[in-house]
Every structure is written in C-alpha cells, then in structure tokens.
Image (cartoon, rainbow, N blue to C red):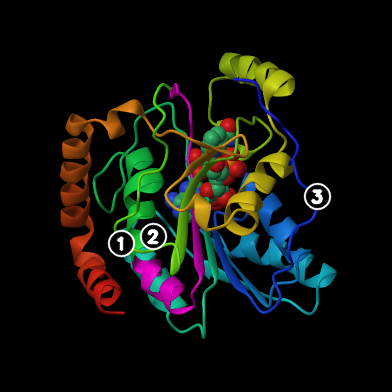
Amino acid sequence: MARNQDRPFSAVQTLDGKTILITGATSGFGASCARILVTLHPARLILAVRSIERGEQFATELRTAHPNIIVDVWILDMLDYHSVQALAQRCTTLPRLDIAILNAGINAFEPKYSKSTGHEEILQVNYLSTALLSILLLPLLKSSKPGRLTISGSAIGLHPKFPERKITPQLVKADDVVVNNVDPGFSAMTGFSKDVPAAAKIVIGVLSAVMGRTAEQGAWTYVDAAVVKGKESHGSFIVNWENYPFHALMYTEEGKKVMEQLWGETIADTGGYGVGQALDDLSHA
Ligand SMILES: NC(=O)c1ccc[n+]([C@@H]2O[C@H](COP(=O)([O-])OP(=O)(O)OC[C@H]3O[C@@H](n4cnc5c(N)ncnc54)[C@H](OP(=O)(O)O)[C@@H]3O)[C@@H](O)[C@H]2O)c1
C-alpha cells in the first residue's frame, strides 16, 4: 500500500490545560509522540513506562525543554494485570484525564509467556492488557469529557474489500470519549524489530528505508488520531491518515459472533482486575 509518510496537515490545536497519558513512552513512536505533545503545551504529561530509570531520564529531557509542563513517570508493566490495574487506579487520583494514547506493544519471534498470567506475551501486552487498561481508563476519560482514547494497532494483512468502516464502540458515545485505533506505519527505526534475527534485520532495515516511516512520522499518526481527528473517527481504524476497514470478518455475522466470544473471554480473563466496577461506572455515569 502506498503511504503518505509525512502528516497531511500543518496546524494542530494546542493542548492547553489538558492531561495526557502515553504508554511505552521510552522509545520509538511513544517517545517521539511525547516529544511532539510537549510542544502543544499540555498541562501535564504522564509517561507510563516499565523502566522508571529510563523514564526519568527521558522526562528530564522533556522538563528541561518545557519547564511549565508537569511530566510524570509512572510504572507500568503490561505483562502483569496487577500493574495495569495499579496504573489505572493511580490515574483516578488525577483531577482529570483528557487523552490516553496506548502505544506500548511488543514484537517477538520466539514464543514467550507471561510469568504472571501464563499467556503468550504478544497476546498479553498488545491485546489483553491493552483491553484491560482501555476499559479501566474509560470512566475517567468520560468524566473529563470529551475524552480521547487512541490505541496503537497494525494493518498488516488487512485488505479493504468492504465499504463498511467503523465498528461502533458499545461502551461509550463519541460525545463522551472518542475511541479510535491507529496504525502508526511500518518502521525499523523504533525498538520494535530489535529482537529479530540478524538476517531478517537487514531485510527489514532495507524495507523500512524504502517504504517505512521514521519514529517521528509514525508519532504524528498518534497526534492525528488523538488530537486532530474528531468525533467522526469514533470506532475507526486509522491507517495512512484515513479511516480504513477493520478485518473483513468483523463485518460478517460469523465475525460478530467471534467478537462476542472474544469480548466474553476478555472480560472473563480480566474480570478480577476492576473491569466490573469500570463497566458499572460507565453504565451509570
Ligand atoms: N514499528 C512498527 O513497524 C510498527 C508497526 C505497526 C504497529 N506498531 C505498534 O507501535 C507501538 C510502538 O512500537 P514501536 O515500533 O515504537 O516499538 P518500540 O520502540 O519497541 O516501543 C514499544 C514500547 O512499548 C513498551 N513496552 C513493551 N513491553 C511493555 C510492557 N510489558 N509494559 C509496558 N511497556 C512495554 C516498550 O518499553 P521499553 O522501552 O521498556 O522496551 C517501548 O517503550 C506498538 O504497539 C507496536 O505494536 C509498530
């Protein structure tokens, strides 16, 4: 697919008074996105990271360049549901949370399993813990409405064939929280391919140089999804700056059953970590 690497817009509204959370902010797209966000003057930026030491190092860079912005470093290990729940609970101490960008994710070439949950690590980090954190943050984002929840994803393997595009989120309305999913694009200039075998690294590096994005170009896709795009992007998968269909299966009756089953299994797996209360808060708020 041909890609527009650079953002197709120039002006971006400032983020005066806003509080923003970004996960996985110590490298790659997440760090580049944090660097962009501070130039938009939010009141507070929370870096949710798995290494406090690296997080503080990066926060010092941001604080030095933008002394008027509060930059916090909060621990998050998405291999462990307890850590995800603890981060979400810590967020409830904030007066408000306007934007959450869930960027943390991994790529692995050998299967590894979370010591905490027993699940395969990609499934745990990229899907299950991301789903849990999304659900737990929604009530707070809704109470700061209009909140924004942008989740990083990947369009690899998707081929648009259907005119349908959005999948209407069931938990919140666009007036309360705009939820969207964005593919930041392919890049070997982040840490994402750091564990690939040496030969594959060369191929990925060449492909990335020819058709990939820099970390900064990818980071702008997050800013586009979380700040520039509006309510029309609620429930959208944004690829190459535009709404894009999800997997074709998701628009079929069979796909709807699969999604219902996935939702049930996700709630069952994450149920012990505050999901019931969050869903209750969402239905009553
Ligand atoms: N690069 C691509 O081609 C590509 C394509 C499509 C989508 N994406 C998505 O883009 C997102 C960012 O990836 P990237 O390319 O910027 O790679 P990256 O440089 O490796 O960044 C991933 C970030 O996630 C954090 N992370 C990993 N495991 C974590 C855990 N268990 N708990 C908390 N944080 C964790 C990492 O923390 P550490 O710094 O501690 O490792 C890092 O900050 C990912 O969700 C990925 O799926 C990437």
Above or below, 261 relative to 269: above
- Give left or right: position of 191 versus 233: right
Viewer-nearest residue: 130 or 9: 9
The image shows residue 88 at horizontal and vertical percentages of 40, 71
Pointer 2: residues within 10 angstroms few (<14), some, or many (20+)? many
The kind of secondary structure element at disc 1 is loop
Res 110 quadrant in image: top left
Alpha carbon distance from label 1 to label 3? 33 Å
Pointer 1: residues within 10 angstroms few (<14), some, or many (20+)? few
Res 2 quadrant in image: top right
The kind of secondary structure element at disc 2 is helix
Res 270 quadrant in image: bottom left
Q: Nearer the viewer, mark 1 or mark 2?
A: 1
The residue labelled by disc 2 is 134
Residue at x-position 34% and y-position 27%: 248
Give the image quadrant in which the ligand numbered 1 is located.
Answer: top right
Residue 98 in view here: yes
Pointer 3: residues within 10 angstroms few (<14), some, or many (20+)? few
Q: Which mark is residue 10?
A: 3
Q: Tell me which label, 3 or 2, sits earlier in the chain.
A: 3
Bounds of the magenta segment: 136-160
Q: Nearer the viewer, mark 3 or mark 2?
A: 3
Find out whether residue 249 is within the magenta segment. no
Q: Which mark is residue 205?
A: none
Residue 27 in view here: no
Q: Residue furthest right?
A: 65
The residue labelled by disc 1 is 171
Alpha carbon distance from label 1 to label 2? 11 Å
Find out whether residue 150 is within the magenta segment. yes
